[in-house]
Amino acid sequence: MSFTSSYVMAGIGTFFILFWLFLYIKYRNAYDQVIDAIDKKKFMFGEIYFIGFGFITLFHINIKTERGSKKIKEISEIYGRKYAEFYHYVITGGSISYFLTLLPMGFCLGAIANNVMLGVLGVVASALLLEYMSGEIKKNVNERREDILEDLPQMLSKFTLLINAGLIVRDAWFKVAYANDKPIYKEMQEACVEMNNGVPVREAVFHFADRCSVAEVRKFANSVNQNMEKGGSELTRVLKELTTVSWEEKRKHQGRKGRCAYR
């Protein structure tokens, strides 16, 4: 193989190494507070994330685009709305840091081995790392939604029993919310905090459904808000119907999961 390609890869690798060193020198102490707040167990090599943060700053990259806003919404389901933008910044900076660290290594290895494919593989691996952390967030979001759907029938059953016993929505909500610490109950607890801070029950219930981002939960929240003033009997009837449907959907879902596992 011609050494021309080796020289080209070496040149590109050297350029990115020098650029990485430039970012290192310029920004190594600029983001200490952010990096100290990062959980190093969840974010590998978090100590070098300042490379990506510096890149964002240097090129004035807007991470709050339409796509970025969608990612922030997903992240809020895992880390909460309060910290969603922070973790979006961390994940974006981390992805860029991985990319800029691995990219020159791929080119340099390709140059040393005089193997273009090795250099190409380095580029591909670097590009995949850009999406890796976003993929992990999506995986966690899907798992969380699965957990919410799994616990929804039981939560509905408890809530329906309390409403049928004569409790008002707010009181029944508080009793159910603190009966467990699984995701759906934690989101109910967040609604309790809002209610205690003066947020109307309807609004807090709406926020609860929005945080869960599950269609079945939104249907439950809408039913509660629409039938709250119609009296206990009407609300109980609607909740019983929802509970029956929810248990049936859970059985079907478990059956599908069982068939997939068997295959």
Image (cartoon, rainbow, N blue to C red):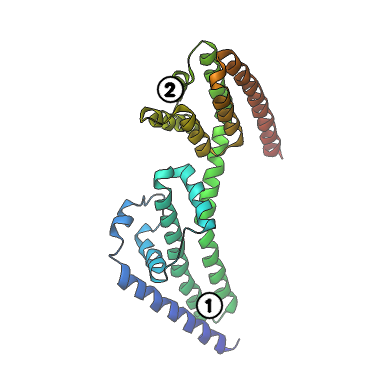
Question: Where does the N terminus fall, quadrant-wise?
Answer: bottom right
Of 85 and 130, the residue lying toward us? 85
In the rendered structure, the answer to whether residue 213 lies left or right of residue 16 reads: right
Query: Where on the picture, by quarter, is residue 247?
Result: top right
In the rendered structure, the answer to whether residue 255 lies left or right of residue 127 reads: right
Name the outermost residue toward the front: 229
Graded by Cα atoms within 10 Å as few (under 14), some (14 to 19) or many (20 or more), the crowding at tag 2 reads some
User: Is 63 placed above or below 241 here?
Assistant: below
In x, y percent, where is residue 103? 48, 71
Residue at point 60% right, 75% down?
117
Residue at point 47% right, 19% down?
172
Mark 1 vs mark 2: which is more N-terminal? 1
Report the Cα–Cα distance between label 1 and label 2.
61 Å
What residue is disc 1 on? 110
User: Is 107 placed above or below 195 here?
Assistant: below
Helix, strand or loop under label 2: helix
In the rendered structure, the answer to whether residue 172 lies left or right of residue 217 reads: left
Helix, strand or loop under label 1: helix
User: Is 135 placed above or below 185 here?
Assistant: below
Residue at point 58% right, 25% down?
153
What's under tag 1, amino acid-wise?
Gly
What residue is disc 2 on? 174
What's under tag 2, amino acid-wise?
Phe
Graded by Cα atoms within 10 Å as few (under 14), some (14 to 19) or many (20 or more), the crowding at tag 1 reads many
In x, y percent, where is residue 71? 51, 52
In x, y percent, where is residue 240? 62, 18
Can residue 182 be seen here? no
Name the outermost residue toward the top: 165
Of 192 and 197, the residue lying toward us? 197
User: Is 248 placed above or below 92 here?
Assistant: above
